[in-house]
Amino acid sequence: MQAFSIRLAGEKDFPAIFLLIREFASFQQSSDKVSITPAQMAADKDLFQAFVAESNGVIVGFATFFWSYYSWSGKALYLDDLYLQPGYRKQGIGKALLQTLIELARSRNCKKVRWQVSNWNRNAIEFYQKMGAVVDDVEINCDLVLH
């Protein structure tokens, strides 16, 4: 097991996070859908929120998130993406990233943490279920791209 730390991302981390976003998109077989750039992340730095996982000074994973509100339950944290490079999986890093988000949500009195997972990603589904998440297949995502 490699030593690691979890911390809130800063603007200096955007280039490394961007590379990991591209890796994640490739893993998801969706490379063509990445339109963000480090410059756009910097321009949106007041909205872009993430935790990063570092090992030996190198960012090896991230979790991006935003605050949300659900009409049925109230305030929530939405986990947009959680990704770890393959060589760093199954070492407790992903669990630490998710637990960091859960604790942040609790500290802000959120009612829940919500996210999506690809239905073919059995490893992620099992991981989330072990963390106590309920994974359903009831809702389907809708995106309306504005430009």
Image (cartoon, helix red, strand yellow):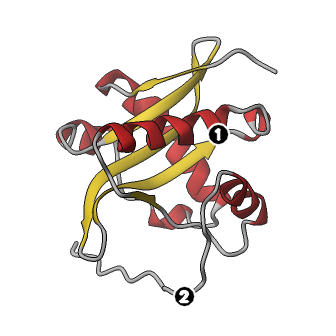
Amino acid under disc 2: Val
Q: Nearer the viewer, mark 2 or mark 1?
A: 2
Q: Quadrant of the N terminus?
A: top right
- Residue 7 position within the rendered picture, expressed as x and y whole percent measured from the top left: 45, 23
User: Left or right: 12 with respect to 101?
Assistant: left
Residue placed most toward the observer, 10 or 95:
95
Determine whether 72 is above or below 114 in the image.
below
Q: Is residue 112 left or right of residue 136?
A: left
- Find disc 2 in the rendering and name its residue: 138
Please count the marks in the image: 2
Q: CA distance from mark 2 to mark 1?
A: 25 Å
- The first of marks 2 and 1 along the sequence is 1
- x and y percentages locating residue 134 in the rendered image: 60, 68
Q: Is residue 15 above or below residue 68?
A: above
Give the secondary structure at mark 2. loop
- Identify the mark at residue 43; answer none if there is no mark: none
Q: Which residue is mark 1?
A: 94
Q: Residue at x 29, y 76 (%)?
A: 72
Three-letter amino acid code at disc 1?
Gly
Q: Residue at x 70, y 15 (%)?
A: 3
Residue at image x 60%, y 84%?
137
The answer to which quarter of the image holds residue 27 is bottom right
Secondary structure at badge 1 equals helix
Q: Residues within 10 Å of mark 1 (few under 14, many from 20)?
A: many
